[in-house]
Image (tube, rainbow, N blue to C red):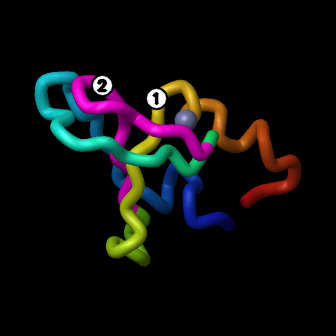
Amino acid sequence: MGLWDDDAVDTRFVQPYQASKTYVCPGCNRDIPPGTGHMVAVPKDAVDLRRHWHRGCWINRHRRRPGRA
Ligand SMILES: [Zn+2]
């Protein structure tokens, strides 16, 4: 079971008007510019590891890693 499995994280959508900083998406290692709607994912067992993801990267995150993160 991986840290970013659906049942291991709490997620929420950040609306564009709520996004006031630049974040780095761990799915693609690219910036999420301010004003971009995106996801925040918080591992239930490791809340310090919360990360901001592009929505598409979050949805597709397991496809990049065959066999589980
Ligand atoms: Zn991304």
Report the magenta residues as a range: 29-42
- Does mark 2 have its CB less than 8 Å from ligand 1? no
Residue 65 makes an appearance in the image: yes
Q: Within 10 Å of the Cα at label 1, are there few (<14), some (14-19), or many (20+) other Cα atoms?
A: some
Do we see residue 58 in this rendering? no
Relative placement, left or right, of 45 versus 60 is: left
**Does the magenta run of residues contain 34?**
yes
Relative to 43, 2 lies left or right:
right
Point 57% across, 66% down: residue: 3
Disc number placed over residue 55 in the picture, else none:
1
Left or right of 6: which side holds 15?
left
Quadrant in which the C terminus is drawn: bottom right
Residue 65 appears at what percent x and percent y? 80, 49
Q: Which residue is mark 2?
A: 37
Kind of residue at disc 2: Gly
Residue at x-position 20% and y-position 34%: 19
Find numbered disc 1 in the image and state the secondary structure of the residue it sits on.
Answer: helix
